[in-house]
Image: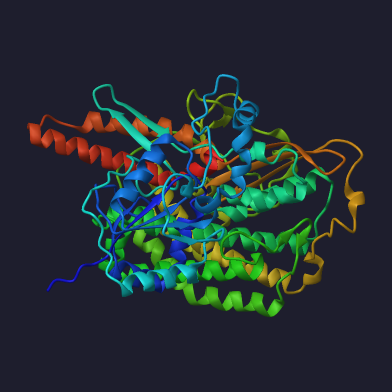
Amino acid sequence: MSLHKIKIAIFDLTGCEGCEFHLLSLNEFLLDFFQDFEIVNWRLVAEKEKADFDIAFVEGAVTTKNQIKLLKEIRETSKIVVVLGACAISGNIFKLTSEKRKKLALKIYNKNYQLKAKFLEPVEKFIKIDEKIPGCPFDVELFKKTLEKFKAKKQISKIKKVTPPDFIAKIEGHGTLKINFKEKKVLFEVAESERLIEGLLVGKDFLQAPFVNSRICGICPVAHNLCSWLAIENALSIKVEPETIILRKILLAAQIIKSHTLHLFFLVLPDYGKTKSAIDFSKKYPAEFHLMLNLKRTADKILEIVGGSPMFPSNTMLGGFKNPPEMEKLFLIKNFIFEVVDEAEDLIKIFSNLKIPELKTDTKFLTIAPVDNSYPLYPASLDFVKNELIKEIIKKNSPAKLGVLKNGEVVKTGAIARLNCFHSILNLKAKRAFQKLDFDFQNPFNNNLAQAIEILHFLEEIINLIDEISIKNLKNAKGIDFLKTPCILKQKLVVGNACIEAPRGILFHQTKIDFQGKIIDYNIIPPTQINLACLEKETQELIKKQKKNSSPHSAKGFGETRQKQKKEIQELIRAFDPCITCAVH
């Protein structure tokens, strides 16, 4: 008698993808999840393929007719449909935009822009739901209990295959790839739906902005939260204490470590490990999988101790923190880091030994100008912020704007840019590791290796920051209770700009606040908007190089060559680590 392994499919609609990345917080339980169930569809970890499944998990809100069609196919096929998180269950805070989407789009884009998402609704409006796992992000313990319940009872669905949307797998957010091999043209199209967060903030109390903005992205919520607080504080002329700056640096460094770790393991290594997915990779290379878990778990502990949560920060506030961490807990962080430093060094060795495609580009790099002679992180120098170097370009029918220099020049930001400009001041172990490498900054595939080096650098940096704050007074990092000090509001409109380094590069926030404390305008330029312009340029260079190096083949060989070239272009896109949900927001 053969055992039927319950087949599970995971689908994402419109949201920050935080619930999907939250699944990765299962840690060791994730291995049980992979072994006890057959994961037949999950865009974040594997290429798409037609699949039938017994249980479907759906995260994100419904925003397009194509998503409605997909949901109906899922419902027809799956015995059980489970919705994950607030966006899928209620639409979350983004549901507030439903009645005024055209008006908000006009403010954010221009009069010629055609909205991709004309509505935003919960999943249950369109299909019957069997289970709900609430939360933002969803409750992991309830998820585990739900899986145990499914395991206890046989779940077999109709055998009807569903074809998932043709989005590029293993990137954060939804994008499609179109290649014209004959004309040597590559088009990467952003297929994410607008959530219109910049419009949603208008009219809201300024204190709400950092927590709404953290929902822009499920993999770098800390960066948006901190950049938002900094823009507000600059608008209100609030000078924060050195202790607050140090704790924010620790928090942001942990976010970068976590983001890089998830990207390198789940989205990149399967390409080089000759496995179909991160699931297969974890089974084939268990040591590397546990290396990733240890690094991620360390970052999660830091995020929780300082930020209040391993996901969306809850402990930050105006001018500082609601409850600054105790020094004993910060010393614990040092112990956690000492246990994983060797593994961070091993990760660099793994990526330095990978055989990557050859490609030479001449793109210029852009990072923030740090306030002192340090590796760029938080915050940018005021002169850099005031110059507002980046301008946004609205592309026809694309929900993601492009970011270029004011003179129109395309630049690249992120780990490889930071390393290129500041490798001489890396921390000791990271610097030694870098110096052993023949690092080619002109090859964009090396952004992956740059991220591995940064993981080690920022682990060391957190230790240094803890040592620095150990001789200071942590009570000074206590935030400002606005209800007790409303006089910080000016009797006029104020504008605040802020710029920091997010995992993927330069992040810019600008807010305008009136004398009642209401936001009257908000603008965000995330790093992926800058990198999308560069991605267009460098994918064109890659396909031209492929064409030059290709030779005549048989019909079969010709098709195989095209598939190999397409795979290489997808690997380049993954090396950019694009955050599509940030780019659209």
Give the quadrant of the C terminus.
Answer: top right
Residue 435 visible to an observer of this rendering? no
- Residue 386, quarter of picture: top right
- Residue 558, quarter of picture: top left
Please name whichever residue, 58 or 236, is drawn nearer the observer in this view of the structure: 58
Give the image location of residue 320, x and y in percent. Answer: 76, 60
Display coloring: rainbow
Give the image location of residue 413, x and y in percent. Answer: 53, 42
Please name whichever residue, 582 or 264, is drawn nearer the observer in this view of the structure: 582
Residue 66 lies left or right of residue 316; in this view the side is: left
Which residue reaches farthest top? 112
Residue 245 lies left or right of residue 182; in this view the side is: right
Vertically, is 124 above or below 396? below
Give the image location of residue 388, x and y in percent. Answer: 68, 34
**Residue sitting at 59 percent across and 60 percent down?**
253
Please name whichever residue, 57 or 253, is drawn nearer the observer in this view of the structure: 57
Residue 208 visible to an observer of this rendering? yes
Please name whichever residue, 482 or 450, is drawn nearer the observer in this view of the structure: 482
Vertically, is 174 above or below 396? below
**Residue sitting at 45 percent across and 56 percent down?**
83
Give the image location of residue 42, x and y in percent. Answer: 34, 53
**Residue sitting at 52 percent across and 49 percent down?**
16
